[in-house]
Amino acid sequence: MVIAAIAFFVIGVYSLAKPVAFLGYLKIPTSPVLEWALQMMGIIMIALSIHQATTSRNAADPAFRRAALLSVLVEFGLSALTYLGPGEFTRLRWTFIGASALVGLLYLITLPIKSIGYQEENPVSSH
């Protein structure tokens, strides 16, 4: 989750600060409405990144699992929407598609590993 949190934070800040440049890299025609929407998305991504970073370090296993399952859906959703969205297929677009899919896959792989580690650290008493 920390890797995704860092990526979401950077993308969120960039979307908020430079929406026209961000759209330009994706070869999507810009408009005031689209710039505003990208800035709104940037704020949401910053908030999500802080939530992900906090959850990954401080949440108990059940909360972590729920957050990780949601993150799997978010990452694969971002990958699919970036692929299906308007505009040309640039290197940056392919990078977003691949990075989102990779992070979603990492969540799927690490989810059971984190759960097993938590269960070993906190065994259920047999009383």
Image (spheres, rainbow, N blue to C red):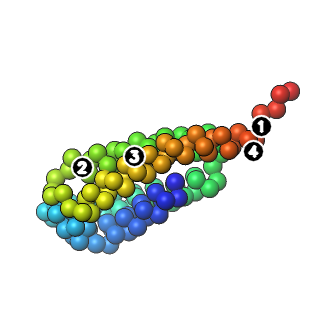
Q: Earlier in the sequence, mark 2 or mark 3?
A: 3
Residue for badge 1: 123
Q: Earlier in the sequence, mark 3 or mark 4?
A: 3
Q: Using the rendered image of the protein, determine whether residue 36 is visible from the camera's viewpoint.
A: no
Say the numbered circle drawn on residue 82.
none
C-alpha gap between disc 2 and disc 3:
14 Å
Amino acid beneath label 2? Tyr
Name the spot of residue 102 as percent of width and height, x first: 40, 51
Amino acid beneath label 3? Val
Question: Is 43 in front, or is 11?
Answer: 11
Q: Earlier in the sequence, mark 2 or mark 4?
A: 2
Residue for badge 3: 74
Rate crowding at label 2 as few (under 14), some (14 to 19) or many (20 or more) other CA atoms within 10 Å.
some
Horizontal relation, residue 10 to residue 57: left or right: left
Q: Secondary structure at mark 3?
A: helix
Q: Using the rendered image of the protein, determine whether residue 84 is visible from the camera's viewpoint.
A: yes
Q: Secondary structure at mark 2?
A: helix
Residue sitting at the far right: 127
C-alpha gap between disc 1 and disc 4:
6 Å
Q: Secondary structure at mark 1?
A: loop
Rate crowding at label 3 as few (under 14), some (14 to 19) or many (20 or more) other CA atoms within 10 Å.
some
C-alpha gap between disc 3 and disc 1:
31 Å
Count of residue discs: 4
Q: Residue at x 77, y 37 (%)?
A: 123
Q: Secondary structure at mark 4?
A: helix
C-alpha gap between disc 2 and disc 1:
43 Å
Residue for badge 4: 121
* Disc 2 versus disc 3: nearer the observer: 2
Q: Earlier in the sequence, mark 3 or mark 1?
A: 3
